[in-house]
Amino acid sequence: MTDDPPSPALLPAGLSDLLPPEAEREAALVEAMVAVFGRHGYERVKPPLLEFEDSLFAGSGAALADQTFRLMDPVSQRMMGLRADTTPQVARIAATRLARTPRPLRLSYAGQVLRVRGTQLAPARQLPQAGIELIGPDLPEADAEVAAVATEALAAIGIADPTLDITLPRLSPALLDAAGVEGEARRRLARALDRKDASAVQALVREAGAAAHVLPGLLAAAGPAEGALAALEDAALPPAARAIADNAAAVIAALRARAPGLRITLDPVEFRGFRYHTGVAFTVFGAGATGEIARGGRYLSGEESATGMTLYPDALLRAVPPAPPRPRVFLPSGADPAQAAALRARGMATVAQLSPADTPASLRCTHILDAAGMPRPLTE
């Protein structure tokens, strides 16, 4: 035990400071992606960090209730929540403030979210997000648009060869419903599917109705989209499941038309982490990146159908090679302001000498403004 006060640098678990130059890199990544969103007609909104919990947990927000920090509003004496995801807030804005705006409604956002718990692989609890939501049309072309725009935004920051993994989180429940699998048998089969335990799935479907007998083949079909689509086409699917498979084929066809070079995989029976999705769901992986860099799919925005994609700048910061650092030019006392302004217009940072104690080294400068008004590298 010690009576020493805690270090002021100590932060709660899962929270951290982002220092130079990473903070500037992350901000630049976000703005570059948001610029792509804007060029496709997605208009930016900025919801508040806090909302009353009854509105924050409406619709798709209910899936994140256990990840939301709550506190009492001292003004209204009502409970509030600190957002754990931005998508439910955009849905609220669309349903209220923009209810009379003609559909389709294209919105974008960027900001921070806070969650009660991180995960073993991603322990951070404060996360940056940037994303788009397309609200209104329940069309394969709309799902294809958000995926294509997201991958274009990734290309703009240096993720040139991502993989789009498509899942059908409603397909397995539809097959289990048609097969009449309920109770403990359903729980065990869902767990086997969740764990990708092919032998357990094979054993369990023997006791289920005929509609479930296609599950082992669909589990094995996960991989490149063309092969998985062929397996779905050949499978004897009940009507509800067939509609899901046909919609997936239409989404992939629309994506091929918009982004012919995009690598697409399809996992027909994957459903983990897609609790509120009502159609196709997306996860994006980057070459060499650890973990997912974006996620989205179709869901209900209030009473409206919507589709969207959330990109994760913290993961992208690790995936994108660092850009060359911005040159820092030391401005000696009395330097010409016009020359300094010209350097800033060229993308350089100018750092002024405020006292004789300021030196290029102490200000971490890479260049110095010479007598001719030119930035001279300090290494020369």
Image (cartoon, rainbow, N blue to C red):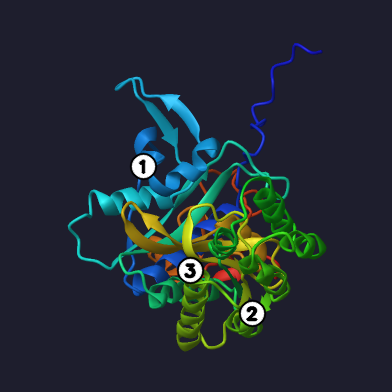
Question: Where is residue 102, by image quadrant?
Answer: bottom left
Q: Are marks 3 and 1 in contact (CB under 8 Å)?
A: no
Q: Secondary structure at mark 3?
A: helix
Q: Residues within 10 Å of mark 2 (few under 14, many from 20)?
A: many
Residue 157 visible from this viewpoint: yes
Give the mark toward the camera: 3 or 1: 3
Q: Position of residue 257 (x, y in %)?
A: 46, 88
| Mark 2 / mark 3, whichever is N-terminal | 2
Is 119 placed above or below 252 here? above
Disc 3 marks which amino acid? Ala
| Mark 3 / mark 1, whichever is N-terminal | 1
Disc 1 marks which amino acid? Pro
Q: Position of residue 1 (x, y in %)?
A: 81, 13
Q: Residues within 10 Å of mark 1 (few under 14, many from 20)?
A: few
Question: Where is residue 137, by image quadrant?
Answer: bottom left
Q: Which residue is mark 2?
A: 228
Q: 61 or 286: which is nearer to us? A: 61
Q: Which residue is mark 3?
A: 240
Disc 2 marks which amino acid? Ala
Residue 331 visible from this viewpoint: no
Q: Which residue is mark 1?
A: 48
